[in-house]
């Protein structure tokens, strides 16, 4: 399989330079990277990394690594863990490449994969269930619903990033919950894992109202063993939070959360339009960057530096901003500014116990921060109509005009979506814009397919693909929809069923870290019964039984007699009642006479 070489991206390269700095040099390090994006957006990338020696970890002497998480890993025999909480969609066409080359990004909802040390597959799956249930309680998430139907075993889509012993028998397991709603219940346990727990350092900027109001956000937890060339090994935990905030929306005060129209005298209209009038305005995009500050965006200022952060000089990069050097930036008096040679990046050294604020006024700028083209464009949709069959369409676009791109495409499908792999077809559209159908083998180099078993496991599909330069490849295949039991439908069955996003791994050696792309999740409509019918059947059945029982009981108990017999019985009955009353009165008077004597 050929390997594509892609040039490093400036902002991504800065992230990776901090990420790939010497990991054994310090015990704890944190940094924040800010970059304005088009369409009035701001990317904020938070990174927290700490190291614990392997010997201390084995002896359960925890300092920076949280004890609650460390004991879970030891009990579940987990050697490497990757957990993702993601909401929203990354707009690659407007925002450019993903932060960290997508390696810290997960699919919509919750995504988890881990390498577990176990002698066999059954033992590894038992440890996997223990791990998911423990993490479910720790992060207040629904990870306990990751059962065998939502668990896969990828072959080539993921590789361990840590340094593992050759004696370990590692098993990779992967699970997703695309319908999980990420909220502040997940952010609070995330903050408790940090050494300063949101009380000092860059973590003081975290606010659930701002974080989950972002257009896109992703929280990640990565734990892996890392060894230095000298043989010193540590257990490294790295937590990241990436979010894309809307500047105008974030600057709106919390006391006024409802957006209101801009007054007429503040509208900026394009007067060159022929339909421009006093009552018609075509908005004119402002060329100058918007003004903003940390206090306006996050609702609070940054409180000093975490006392546990390293002091070996790398703390100068605890907060970095990527804007042209010609643009004015105002910072707090106690902070120091350091500009880098690339002409766009500046970092700030914060005072230990002083609040830090950063403000950028609106000003004319002649230079814009360059945004590079993503290495691959991917899109996945469900096509077809009806309640029985459908199809999947995946579109890959290679923006490079010179080089082909090789990648791994990984899909995890639910068991009730049954794909027909023999219907897999490929269509290529070259630069001339004319599509032509080609054999799938020309695009797909290798295939790994693990079919589903009803109610036991889902479908796993991994493809090794190659897209030529300046071309667009469309893959399609048909599938069949299964009919579920009525007890297997959720309360919101008419909404549809979530299909996990696809994972794309770019085969590229130009980056030290792997390059990943996640597609959006899908909504699958299944044949849904009318859930009011069981109640109608119950009511009708109860009515029929009541009528039948009443009729039979009436026939068995009621005595049928003639009119003469009925009158005689009635008279005898009246006569007997009168005689009974007379006897009772007689007995009462006799009792009184006896007492008098």
Image (tube, grey):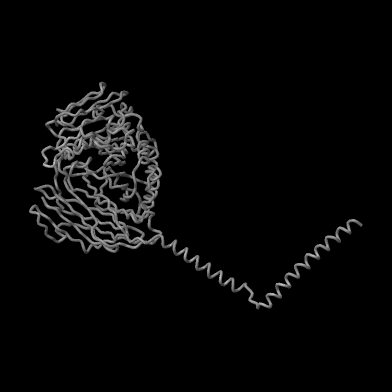
Q: Report if residue 27 is visible in the image.
A: no
Instruction: Tell me if I can see residue 428 in this picture.
Output: yes
Which quadrant of the view contains residue 474?
Answer: bottom left
Toward the top, the furthest residue is: 333
**The one of 105 and 595 positioned closer to us in this rendering:** 595
Vertical order, 429 against 102 (above or below): below
Is 150 displayed left or right of 348 in the figure? right
Q: Position of residue 338 (x, y in %)?
A: 19, 26
* 422 vs 389, nearest the viewer: 389
Establish if 563 lies above or below 308. below
Where residue 377 appears, x then y in whole percent?
A: 18, 48
Name the spot of residue 452 as percent of width and height, x first.
Answer: 31, 60
Tell me where residue 476 appears, x and y as whole percent.
20, 59
375 w.r.t. 13: above or below: below
Q: How many marks?
A: 0
Q: Quadrant of the C terminus?
A: bottom right
Q: Residue at x 9, y 57 (%)?
A: 434
Query: Which residue is rendered at x = 14% and y = 45% of the image?
Result: 5
Residue at the right extreme? 597
Dividing the picture into quarters, in which one does residue 8 lie? Answer: top left
Does 371 sit left or right of 585 as displayed? left
Q: Nearer the viewer, residue 89 or 155?
A: 89
């Amino acid at each position: 399989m050929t390997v594509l070489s892609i040039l490093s991206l400036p902002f991504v390269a800065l992230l990776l330079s901090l990420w790939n700095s010497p990991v054994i040099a310090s015990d704890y390090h944190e940094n924040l990277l800010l970059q304005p994006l088009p369409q009035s957006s701001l990317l904020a990338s938070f990174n927290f990394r700490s190291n614990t020696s392997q010997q201390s970890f084995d002896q359960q002497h925890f300092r920076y690594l949280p004890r609650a998480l460390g004991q879970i890993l030891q009990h579940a025999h987990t050697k490497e863990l990757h957990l993702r909480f993601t909401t929203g969609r990354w707009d690659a066409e407007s925002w450019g490449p993903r932060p960290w080359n997508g390696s810290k990004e997960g699919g919509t909802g919750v995504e988890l994969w881990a390498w577990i040390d176990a002698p066999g597959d059954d033992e590894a799956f038992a440890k996997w269930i223990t791990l998911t249930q423990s993490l479910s309680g720790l992060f207040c998430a629904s990870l306990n619903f990751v059962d065998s139907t939502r668990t896969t075993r990828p072959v080539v889509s993921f590789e361990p990033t840590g340094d593992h012993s050759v004696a370990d028998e590692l098993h990779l397991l992967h699970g997703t919950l695309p319908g999980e709603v990420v909220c502040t219940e997940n952010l609070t346990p995330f903050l408790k894992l940090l050494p300063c727990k949101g009380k000092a350092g860059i973590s003081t900027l975290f606010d659930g109202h701002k974080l989950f109001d972002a257009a896109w956000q992703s929280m990640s937890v990565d734990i892996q063993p890392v060894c230095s060339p000298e043989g010193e090994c540590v257990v490294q935990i790295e937590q990241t939070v990436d979010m894309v905030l809307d500047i105008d929306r974030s600057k709106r005060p919390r006391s006024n959360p409802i957006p209101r129209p801009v007054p007429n005298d503040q509208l900026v209209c394009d007067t060159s339009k022929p339909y421009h009038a006093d009552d018609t305005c075509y908005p004119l995009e402002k060329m100058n960057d918007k003004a903003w500050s940390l206090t306006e965006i996050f609702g609070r200022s940054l409180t000093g530096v975490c006392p546990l952060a390293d002091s070996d000089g790398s703390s100068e990069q605890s907060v970095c901003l990527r804007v042209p050097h010609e643009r004015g930036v105002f910072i707090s008096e106690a902070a120091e500014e350091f500009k880098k040679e690339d002409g766009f990046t500046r970092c700030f050294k914060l005072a230990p116990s002083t609040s830090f604020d950063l403000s950028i006024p609106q000003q004319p700028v002649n230079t814009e921060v360059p945004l590079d083209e993503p290495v691959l464009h991917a899109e996945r949709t469900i096509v077809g109509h009806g309640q029985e069959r459908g199809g999947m369409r995946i579109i890959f676009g290679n923006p490079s005009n010179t080089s082909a791109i090789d990648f791994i495409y990984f899909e995890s499908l639910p068991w009730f979506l049954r794909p027909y792999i023999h219907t897999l077809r490929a269509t290529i559209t070259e630069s001339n814009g004319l599509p032509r159908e080609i054999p799938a083998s020309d695009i797909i180099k290798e295939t790994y397919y693990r079919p589903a078993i009803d109610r036991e496991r889902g479908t796993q599909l991994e493809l090794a693909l190659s897209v030529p330069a300046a071309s667009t490849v469309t893959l399609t295949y048909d599938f069949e929809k299964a009919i579920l039991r009525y007890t297997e439908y959720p309360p919101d069955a008419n909404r549809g069923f979530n299909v996990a996003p696809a994972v794309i791994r770019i085969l590229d050696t130009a980056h030290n870290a792997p390059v990943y792309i996640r597609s959006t999740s899908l909504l699958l409509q299944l044949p849904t019964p009318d859930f009011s019918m069981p109640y109608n059947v119950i009511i009708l059945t109860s009515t029929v039984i009541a009528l039948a029982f009443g009729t039979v009981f009436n026939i068995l108990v009621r005595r049928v007699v003639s009119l003469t017999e009925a009158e005689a019985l009635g008279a005898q009955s009246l006569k007997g009642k009168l005689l009974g009353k007379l006897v009772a009165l007689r007995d009462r008077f006799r009792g009184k006479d006896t007492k008098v004597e």
